[in-house]
Amino acid sequence: MTGTSILGNPVKRVEDPRILSGDARFVADLDLPGALTAVFVRSTMAHARLEAVDTEAAAKMPGVVAVYTAADLGLPDIPAFAMAPPSSSPTPPSRGSTPPAR
């Protein structure tokens, strides 16, 4: 690698040989007694506003220890954000202005 930047230069990663040979260890490979797995379920609809979440069926599933919603954890509501108009959209004329000549 030349210079001090990794941008545009190949970077030798030290973990690659272990990963490629199958010798790497991952957190999922650890067998820790009493360890639990967390699963996060998100809305399948972008920018949807969820009014309620029924967790009863999930709580009854075999092996489930707990089910939490944002309300259970006291998390604040995340406000929706305004989408910026596409840059190809013409700027609307201001009130009282003359439209451009074509």
Image (cartoon, grey):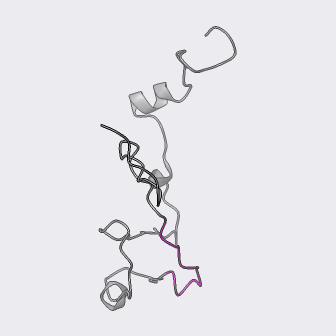
Percent of width and height locating residue 79: 52, 73
Check the image and report above or below for 28 versus 15: below
30 and 44: which one is in front?
44
Identify the residue at horizontal 48%, vertical 59% (top origin): 31
Identify the residue at the far top of this view: 2
73 within the magenta span: yes
58 within the magenta span: no
Give the number of marks: 0
Q: Which residues are magenta?
A: 70-81
Q: Main secondary structure of the magenta part?
A: loop
| Quadrant assignment for the N terminus | top right
Identify the residue at horizontal 68%, vertical 10% (top origin): 3
| Quadrant assignment for the C terminus | top left
Identify the residue at the far right of this view: 4
Percent of width and height locating residue 53: 37, 86
Identify the residue at horizontal 37%, vertical 79% (top origin): 63
49 and 20: which one is in front?
49
Percent of width and height locating residue 94: 47, 56
Percent of width and height locating residue 91: 42, 49
65 and 52: which one is in front?
52
